[in-house]
Image (cartoon, rainbow, N blue to C red):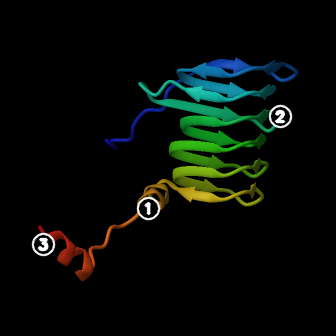
Amino acid sequence: MFSKKKQPIIKSLLAKGAHIEGDIRFSDGLRIDGEISGDIRANLESSSILVISETGSINGELHAEHIIINGTVNGPIFASKLLELQPKAKVVGDVSYRSLELHQGALVTGQLIPQTDIKDKIEAKKPTLQITSKDKEEAKKP
């Protein structure tokens, strides 16, 4: 009846008490209840969901389509579709997102950057060329 896209299923879990040092790549869904020191990146060729539970702790970058955080993240976050910051979320780092759901109690120490603003900032940094009348006169000289 409603054309809501189905979420990918969570196929991987890092359990509470586990600690990984190093980068992680995943596809579909990943839930983290433990600790990770390293970057976490979803496969860009398929839809993805990353869940950080209230016992989860990350020191590194997060990259995924849909990210749900209720734990601690120290590092930048890049959610290409939706970022959900639940009541116990604590984020230290800049957050880039297309859509944001921010619950009361969530804490972000960093900039909230909507993805449309990123494109605007890139465009603003490009220098503009202006031709003055003096330039036009010099161009006409043989």
Image disc number at residue 130: none
| Lateral position of residue 34 relative to residue 78, left or right | right
As displayed, is residue 41 above or below residue 142? above
Say the numbered circle drawn on residue 120: 1
Q: Residue at image x 38%, y 41%? A: 4
Q: Nearer the viewer, residue 133 or 23?
A: 133
Residue receiving disc 3: 140
The reply to whether discs 2 and 1 touch (Cβ–Cβ < 8 Å) is: no
- Residue sitting at the far right: 17
Image coordinates of residue 85 in percent, x first then y, are 67, 50
Check disc 2 and report the residue beneath it: 55
Separation of marks 2 and 3 at Cα, in angstroms: 71 Å
Q: Nearer the viewer, residue 77 or 124?
A: 124
Circle 3: residue type: Lys
User: Is residue 72 shown above or below 92?
Assistant: above
Viewer can see residue 107: no
Q: Amino acid at mark 1?
A: Asp
Q: CA distance from mark 1 to mark 3?
A: 36 Å
Furthest residue in direction bottom, as rendered:
133
Name the spot of residue 79 as percent of width and height, x first. Answer: 55, 43
